[in-house]
């Protein structure tokens, strides 16, 4: 039988931490970028808005709000609400022609919105 000897081991010091109990985290996403991403994802959180974007991505010319009301069997107010959310998130632009608004994908769409659509 062999004898086991005792060996002194050094005491290891944990890495310096400001807060928390585990390893330090990388820097957080900047607040402005996080807000942009949240706005984009909120706009995409409704199936009707996704369908509207799909329709606009395949349209050869701007689409009238009246065409959306017919395509989705929704009131003009509901359609306008959805379109406002998409416009606020930077997905679409509107042009007035008389009493009607016409919509198309925004050519200056933010990169986060473009990526969300796979463009």
Image: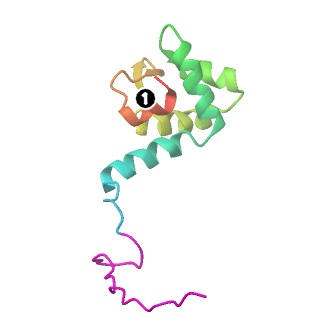
Q: Magenta span has 15?
A: yes
Expressed as whole percent of the image width and height from the top left, the position of residue 107 reads 36, 21
Residue situated furthest top in the rendering: 60
Point 33% across, 82% down: residue: 12
Point 64% across, 25% down: residue: 69
Q: Which residue is mark 1?
A: 114
Graded by Cα atoms within 10 Å as few (under 14), some (14 to 19) or many (20 or more), the crowding at tag 1 reads some
Q: Quadrant of residue 18?
A: bottom left
Expressed as whole percent of the image width and height from the top left, the position of residue 53 reads 55, 26
Range of residues picked out in magenta: 1-23
Q: Secondary structure at mark 1?
A: helix
Q: Eyeballing the image, is 74 above or below 10?
A: above
Q: Eyeballing the image, is 42 above or below 24?
A: above
Q: Quadrant of residue 88?
A: top left
Expressed as whole percent of the image width and height from the top left, the position of residue 106 reads 39, 24
Please name the predominant secondary structure of the magenta segment in the image. Answer: loop
Q: How is colour applied across the structure in the image?
A: rainbow
Q: How many marks?
A: 1
* Nearest to the observer: residue 117 or residue 14: 14
Q: Magenta span has 66?
A: no
* Nearest to the observer: residue 49 or residue 83: 49
Residue situated furthest right in the rendering: 73
Point 50% across, 7% down: residue: 60
Point 66% across, 33% down: residue: 75
The N terminus - image quarter = bottom right
Q: Is 94 on the left or on the right of 80, as rendered?
A: left
* Nearest to the observer: residue 5 or residue 96: 5
* Nearest to the observer: residue 77 or residue 108: 108
């Amino acid at each position: 039988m062999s004898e086991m000897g005792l060996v002194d081991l050094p005491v290891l010091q944990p890495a310096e931490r400001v807060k928390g109990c585990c390893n330090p985290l990388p820097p957080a996403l900047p607040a402005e970028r996080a807000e942009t991403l949240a706005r984009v994802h909120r706009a995409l959180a409704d199936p009707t808005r996704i369908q509207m974007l799909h329709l606009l991505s395949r349209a050869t010319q701007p689409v009238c709000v009246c065409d959306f009301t017919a395509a989705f069997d929704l009131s003009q107010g509901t359609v306008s609400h959805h379109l406002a959310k998409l416009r606020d998130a930077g997905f679409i632009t509107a042009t007035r022609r008389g009493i009607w608004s016409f919509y198309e994908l925004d050519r200056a769409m933010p990169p986060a919105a473009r990526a969300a659509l796979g463009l």
